[in-house]
Image: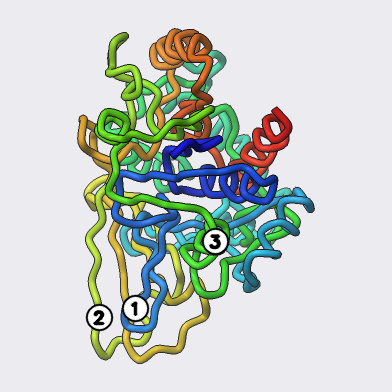
Amino acid sequence: MKYDFLVVGAGLFGAVFAHEMRLAGKSVLVIDKRAHIAGNIYTEQEAGIHVHKYGAHIFHTSNERVWNYVNHLTCFNNYINSPIARYKDELYNLPFNMNTFYAMWGVTTPAEAKAVIEQQKAAAGIAHPANLEEQAISLVGTDVYEKLIKGYTMKQWGRACRELPAFIIRRLPLRFTFDNNYFNDTYQGIPIGGYTAMVEKLLEGVEVILGAPYRSFSKETGHQFERIIYTGAIDEFFDYSLGELEYRSLRFEQELLIGCANYQGNAVVNYTEEEIPYTRIIEHKHFEFGTQPDTIISKEYPAAWSRGKECYYPVNDERNNDLYEKYRQLAAGQKQVIFGGRLGQYKYYDMDKVVEAALELAASVADR
């Protein structure tokens, strides 16, 4: 068969694009190397709980058009992301706010909190931060850095903070209010019924082939395509001809706790001390205010990436950005192929930005 578009990847970017092309009357085939749709936002129902199989995903946006778009697909609940940080036996609210500062120093006013932070910054005497540790201390002082940033960041990146470049933390938001809402966006929530159901809605009427890696599919298929939308890793597309881009990966340990209705009292608890190997525990039922008699938790372990592992986070340091730019120039020579999404463009995207970018691409090619 001849199709207008082959979409490589049935994640959010590919699904939105395919949906828009179907509405525009274009013929589309979607393939994905995984055995399921929805990419990293895939949710699966277990014990009556929608489990985020690839880590917590909270939809948030200030883009009314994007919010209206996803709400035409599914209903969202009013979940507000308010993670807790655990350092040894101490609990702190995130993002850093007056509740955090009260628990850490006993201060009760914004002026008192600012005074402590400024005193610690002055004592550190860092005029020109040379690494992530110095950058963080110069922004938030030593206590917040030592308890809430140092260990977590080391686990996340697999390197000591002194070995990481300062630009990774350009700013750290400090809120001098008693507001535990992690996001500042106008709209926020979780799809009722899970993200997979939302992506299923996007892909209604679209032909999808799962368990089909692009390279082997392209060799074996007899289908023809006018254009290809590629959302996989850009360096993999070019067979790593210029070298590997660097990513961080994750692994998850999931556990069903029979007879435990509430394990930690919150959907997300970050573990910020270095000695605990995982960065956070997710208790999935709290995303949808579940009342099930049992609960499911997932421990999230950052991991080094190697070929064959999932690419979760691009490492956007100077070396990798320079290498990506070379791949981007190679990609510009691919007249049939458009690279999109987090891996195709080697950048971290929030979900609303994924939807926005896919809609923009769809609008730009719909009439061609």
Other residues around mark 2 within 10 Å, as few (<14) / some (14–19) / many (≥20): some
The residue nearer to you, when weighing 94 against 233, is: 233
Left or right of 158, for residue 102: right
Left or right of 217, for residue 181: right
Left or right of 277, for residue 73: right
Residue drawn at (57%, 52%) of the image: 95
Which labelled disc corresponds to residue 204?
Answer: 3
Left or right of 54, for residue 192: right
Disc 2 target residue: 257
Other residues around mark 3 within 10 Å, as few (<14) / some (14–19) / many (≥20): few
Q: Nearer the viewer, mark 3 or mark 2?
A: 3
Alpha-carbon span between mark 3 and mark 1: 37 Å
Residue drawn at (64%, 64%) of the image: 73
Disc 1 target residue: 263
**Image: 220 above or below 81:** above
| Three-letter code, disc 3 | Glu
Alpha-carbon span between mark 3 and mark 2: 35 Å
Q: Give x and y (percent) for residue 14.
A: 51, 43
Alpha-carbon span between mark 1 and mark 2: 8 Å
Q: Are marks 1 and 2 in contact (CB under 8 Å)?
A: yes
Q: Are marks 3 and 2 in contact (CB under 8 Å)?
A: no
Q: Give x and y (percent) for residue 32.
A: 36, 45
Residue drawn at (29%, 43%) of the image: 212
Q: Nearer the viewer, mark 1 or mark 2?
A: 2
**Image: 113 above or below 52:** above
